[in-house]
Image (cartoon, rainbow, N blue to C red):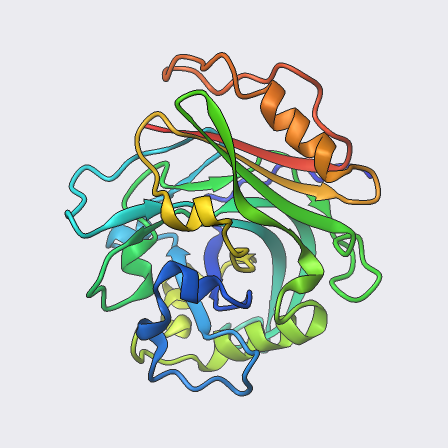
Amino acid sequence: MKTYPTPNLTNVLCLGVAGNFAGHLEQAGETPDFVNIKPQDATAPKGLFPIYVPNHSGFLGQNPLSSSRITYPKQLAENAHLQAEPEVCVLFDVTYQDEKEKGLVSQLTPCAFTAFNDCSIRKPGAKKISEKKNWGAETKGIAERFFPLHQFEAGGELDPFHIASYLKRDGKLHAYGQDSSVLTYSYFHQQLTQWIIQQLNNQSDFGPLENLQEHIKIAGYPKQILITLGATTYTEFGETVFLKPNDELFFYVYDSTQNSKESILNHAKENSAPKPPLSSKPSSHCPPPVHTAILHQIID
């Protein structure tokens, strides 16, 4: 599989899907946030939330994306915690219903996909999801290697891929999220695409959700939107052990027809030592698995 040229995401609106993987919200302790959100069916996601809005005058205008590190929050409340979220994200071209006047979205055309870390602050009392998602530069993770996605439908390039994640702490490597096929997302393919378009055009400022038409306008009606599709469920370790400085994360979005779970784990083991200085990017000691997007980040 050929790679897709690494895009410049400076002017790309970045949004996340909430509640698109059965069991994740429960593990993250976030189901109370959505008690008043009534999705169209029991398996539907809860909504879309902003991660990065170009030109925004507030915290959402800070570009949080990094391929090498996560900046630990400077002032984290005693009852708050930091937790990584292993996901796959998709870059879409956007078509508006009226290209002259802009506004409502009529079509999303898939371009590429890669690994994403929707690293989040778990804190009670946040009014909006976005308050837990962006606390400055280098607070989200995205792999440098993208793969082309010509069709986001059954049989497309993304279908055989899995998401795997590991955390290294004190020299030991732990499985962080459950190794999961992308086909286990609650909404996927055209069902998810059409749902995203509906949310972009109709989601209002209600509960933990925000008016997305306002964010699209602030972002200057971007030609592309990056959507991160939702986090997998955690292992027992990932659910109960929260991030701290000097931890290392290894996220993989890998082609399961070309790689085994064991080969991915072996790659993480071989690349988890020795720890590089914080002033440099995490180093890689063995060749990457084929057809795999790898995100390796240090918490500092």
**Which image quarter is the N terminus in?**
top right
Q: Choose top left, top right, bottom left or bottom right for residue 204.
A: bottom left
**Which image quarter is the C terminus in?**
top left
Q: Choose top left, top right, bottom left or bottom right for residue 193.
A: bottom right
Write the residue at 66% across / 25% down. Answer: 267
Q: State the residue in front, 277 or 233.
A: 233
In the drawing, does residue 185 fall left or right of residue 204?
Answer: right
What is the tally of numbered marks visible in this picture? 0
| Residue 67, visible in the rendered structure | yes
Picture coordinates of residue 38 (x, y %)? 43, 86
In the drawing, does residue 265 fall left or right of residue 121?
Answer: right
Write the residue at 81% across / 66% down. Answer: 154
Q: State the residue in front, 185 or 233.
A: 233
Q: State the residue in front, 165 or 198.
A: 165
In the drawing, does residue 240 fall left or right of residue 259?
Answer: left
Instruction: Say above or below: 78 vs 276.
Output: below
Write the residue at 51% across / 49% down. Answer: 235
Write the residue at 39% across / 52% down. Answer: 54
Picture coordinates of residue 31 (x, y %)? 37, 71
Instruction: Say above or below: 274 vs 94.
Output: above
Picture coordinates of residue 123 (x, y %)? 24, 57
Picture coordinates of residue 10 (x, y %)? 46, 43
| Residue 56, visible in the rendered structure | no
Residue extending furthest toward the front: 236
Q: State the residue in front, 141 or 56.
A: 141
In the drawing, does residue 233 fall left or right of residue 139?
Answer: right
Q: Choose top left, top right, bottom left or bottom right for residue 224.
A: bottom right
